Amino acid sequence: MSYNPLIGWQVDRHAITFVGHDLQRPECIIAQRDGTLWAADARGGVMRINPDGSQSLLCPQDARISEGSFEERFIQSRNASLPNGLALTAQGDFIICNWGLDRIEHLSAQGHLKVLHDHLDGLPLGKTNFPLLDSKGRTWFTVTTQMQPWADSINAQVADGYIGVIDDNGIRIVASDLEGTNEIRFDDAEEWLYVVESNARRISRFRVGPDATLRAREVYGPPSLEGFPDGFAFDSAGNLWVTLIMTDKLIAITPQGEVLTLLDDGNEQANAELYRQRDNRTLTPQVMQAAHGQLAPWMASITFGGPDLKTVYLGSLLGNRIPCFRSPVSGQPLIHW
C-alpha cells in the first residue's frame, strides 16, 4: 500500500486564515494559480478577490436579488438571482448555475449576462446546481431536484435529479434518477464522472462513453455517509475530499474506501436533532438553519489553489468570508486550460 499523507492528519484550527469580507453566499470558489479567487455571490454575480485582498463584484446591473428571510432566500429560493456553481472559461467568462432562477447563464468578464438555457424538452430545468467544462469543450451540469421548494425533496427522498450536457448537438439529459444531484468532477483522464447525491448521502460515478454518454453507474466509497455531502475534490494521492453541509464536517474518502475526518466544525446538539428529523423524514427549515458551524457555516465546497495546489479554500452558504489552510498533499486542478 502506498503512503497516504492524510492518514493521521487533521486540519489545525489555529492555522486557518480567512480571505475576503462581506461576501454573500460564497458557495462555489474558483482559484487561479496567480492567487486570484472568484466566489459565487448572492447579489447576482461573482466576487473577484485579488491576491492583495482587494475585491470587486462582477455583476449584471439588472440582477434580480432578494433581501428576504433565510427561508425566503435559501429554502424557497425562487424568482431571485442566486448563483451557485461556477465554471471559468478559457476566455475569462463564467458559466453559472443559477439556483434561484433555475437556469444556466453565461456571464462575460465585462459583466454582460446571457441566459443559455432555462428549459429542456419544453420543461423548466429545475434547481440547477453545478457546471463543469471538459477538455472537449462540452458543458456538463447538474440539476438537484425539480421540487419546489427544493428542501421538500429531502423528506420525500425523491430521485428526480439529473446530469445534463450541452454540446454542438444542444442540451440533453445523460443520467437521471439521482437523489439531490450536486457537484460533479472528472478523474484526470475524464474516464469517470463522479457525482454527489446529497439527499442519498453518497458519491456515485459513471463511466464516460462516446458522445458524452454515461454508463456503468456505481457507488464510490461508503453507501451512506454520516451527513449530507455537498462539494468534493480529488487530491494527487487519490483521496476524495468531501464537505458535509449543515453538519459542517470535512472528510476524505481514501482510495481504499476508508473515511477520514479532517475537520469537524459542527454543533453536536443541533446535528443530533438534524439527524433525528432526517431519519424521520420530518426535516424543517428551522432545524436545517440551526445546524451549522462557525468557520464556514453550511460548508458547501472545497477548492485547491495556490501555485502548488496545496491551499484549501472552503465555500459556504451562510458565511461572509472564506476559510483557508494548507494541505499536506496537492489537489487536482479544476482549471485545465
Image (cartoon, grey):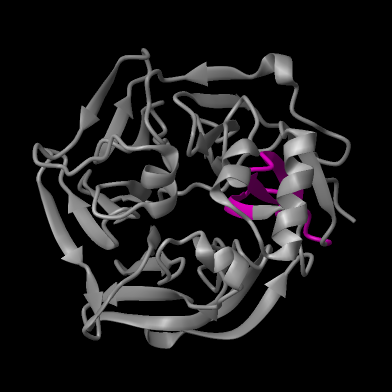
Q: Say which residue appears at 54% left-offset and 48% top-offset.
A: 285
254 falls in the magenta region: yes
Whole-percent x, y for residue 278 in the image: 70, 59
Q: Is residue 271 above or below residue 231?
A: above
Whether residue 180 appears in this view of the structure is: no
Q: Is residue 81 above or below residue 268?
A: below
Which of 134/291 is in front? 291
Relative side of 314 to 225, left or right: left
Q: Say which residue appears at 79% left-offset and 36% top-offset.
A: 269
Residue 142 picture quarter: bottom left
Quarter of the figure that contains the N terminus: bottom right
Which of 200/52 is in front? 200
Q: Is residue 220 above or below residue 239?
A: below
Whole-percent x, y for residue 268 in the image: 79, 35
Relative side of 26 to 100, left or right: right
Q: Is residue 297 above or below residue 211?
A: above
Residue 63 picture quarter: top left
Q: Say which residue appears at 43% left-offset and 45% top-offset.
A: 71
The segment highlighted magenta reads 229-256
133 falls in the magenta region: no
Q: Say which residue appears at 34% left-offset and 74% top-offset.
A: 165
Judged by its main secondary structure, the magenta piece is: strand
